Image: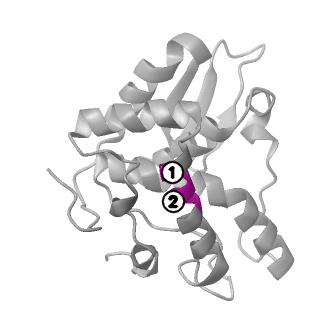
Amino acid sequence: MTVNNNLVLIRQANVKDLERLFFECFYKDYATVLVGGYSEPLYLPAGDDRRECQLQFRKDFFASALHEIAHWCIAGRERRKLVDFGYWYRPDGRTPAEQKAFELVEVRPQALEWVFSMATGVCFQLSSDNLQAEEPASNGDFADAVYQQVLSYCAQGLPPRGELFARKLAAYYGLGDPVDSSFYDRQILSRRPLS
């Protein structure tokens, strides 16, 4: 399967494959497992009641798993000691200032999620995670920032764990180099999700 002229492919995606690939990449060094089936995503560090860290994603949603993996790959050692990496979360109904703060934190993970999506052949959907947002995420500064971050990752390299996982995904799914900037097109971020 090839990616052709900025076309994002849609394929059958199996979260069990992601869980296994994540385990193969990271369990030995980080004692972290990826687990689906939850109503909300959450990262739990190891503690008195847990021998290993848990990276939980929503239900069996492939995109949720990729997004949480992106956050984990970016989080530093100290953040990985905190529940949900110490990030604040406010659901729908954020003020414009809160939405802007949310988007600033989300640029790097969503750009890395896009790379992971390309490595798996799954369509990437930019998310403002706020149904009440005044402007769709695919328009404006947020989409531009995610696109520029992807180009930066392609030129300067991914975070080390992100690089390892992107390469593992690309090898498993048989796709090309996920950090080839010619695969990324700002217009893709403006596409509406398929129904």
Corner quadrant of residue 54: top right
Residue range (magenta): 149-154
Dot 1 alpha-carbon crowd within 10 angstroms: few under 14, some 14 to 19, many 20 or more:
few
Q: Residue at x 78, y 13 (%)?
A: 48
Q: Is residue 86 above or below residue 145?
A: above
Type of amino acid at the residue the image marks with label 2:
Leu
| Residue closer to the observer: 67 or 40 | 67
Give the numbered dot on residue 151: 2
Tell me, yes or no, if residue 61 can be seen here. no
Dot 2 alpha-carbon crowd within 10 angstroms: few under 14, some 14 to 19, many 20 or more:
some
Tell me, yes or no, if residue 92 can be seen here. yes
Q: Is residue 26 left or right of residue 44?
A: left
Corner quadrant of residue 79: top right
Type of amino acid at the residue the image marks with label 1:
Ala
Camera-nearest label, 2 or 1 = 1
Q: Quadrant of the C terminus?
A: bottom left
Q: Is there CB contact under 8 Å for labels 2 and 1?
A: yes
| Residue closer to the observer: 188 or 99 | 188
